[in-house]
Image: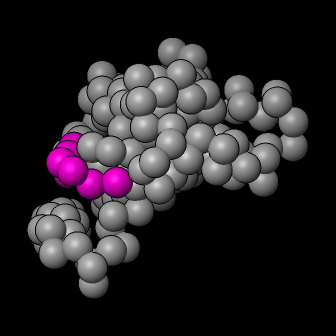
Amino acid sequence: MCAVLARDADIAIKLQMLIYPGVSAWQKSASHAELAEGYLLLSDTIQWFFEQYLRDENDRDDWRFAPLDAAAGQPDYGGVAPAWIAAAEFDPLYDEDIAYTEKLRTAGVAVTLARYESMIHEFFKMGGYVPEVAAAHADAVNALRKAFEG
C-alpha cells in the first residue's frame, strides 16, 4: 500500500484514487462467490493474476499485497492520504472494496465511496461503449479537483 509507505516516508499525497481495487488475498466474499463467472473478471483470472505476483502462498499474508487482510495495527492506516474508491456492483471485488472503505474509515481516513450500479470490473475503460461511464469519469475528475484545490 503506497499510501502507508508514503506516510511513513513523510511524503504528502493528496488523494488515493482507487478504481475497483483488489485489496484481499482471499476470494471468500459473497460478491466473489456470486460473480465468479459471467461478469468479465473470472475467479480463474484472479488466481492467474495472483500467481504472477506471489512468490509463494506465504506472500498472501503480506499487507502490501492485501491491505484489507492486514491484522489490526499491522500496519496502522491512520494518517494516510484521503481516498476515493470506485466500486462496480457486478464486480467480484465489490465486497472487498466496501470492506476496505470501512477499514480506512475506522482508521480515521477520509474516504469517498462511489458505487456504480449495473457496472462490471473494467467499466471505467469502457467510456467509448457505455454512455453511463461518463458520470464515473466526471466523479473521478471532481475528486481530483477537490483534492488539488487547496
Residue 117 located within the stretch drawn in magenta = yes
Question: Which quadrant is home to the C terminus?
Answer: bottom left
**Residue shown at 51% from the left, 38% from the top:** 36
Residue 134: give x, y in percent of width and height.
16, 74
**Residue shown at 78% from the left, 54% from the top:** 52
Residue at the farthest bottom position: 128
Is residue 95 toward the left or the right of residue 1 in the image?
left
Q: Nearer the viewer, residue 61 or 131?
A: 131
Q: Is residue 44 shown above or below 28?
A: below
Residue at the farthest front position: 38
Q: Which residues are magenta?
A: 113-120
Corner quadrant of residue 15: bottom left
Q: Nearer the viewer, residue 80 or 121?
A: 121
Residue 124 located within the stretch drawn in magenta = no
Q: Is residue 149 shown above or below 36?
A: below
Residue 47: give x, y in percent of width and height.
69, 42
Residue at the farthest top position: 72
Residue 135: give x, y in percent of width and height.
12, 68
Corner quadrant of residue 132: bottom left
**Residue shown at 31% from the left, 33% from the top:** 98
Is residue 69 toward the left or the right of residue 83 in the image?
right
Corner quadrant of residue 61: top right
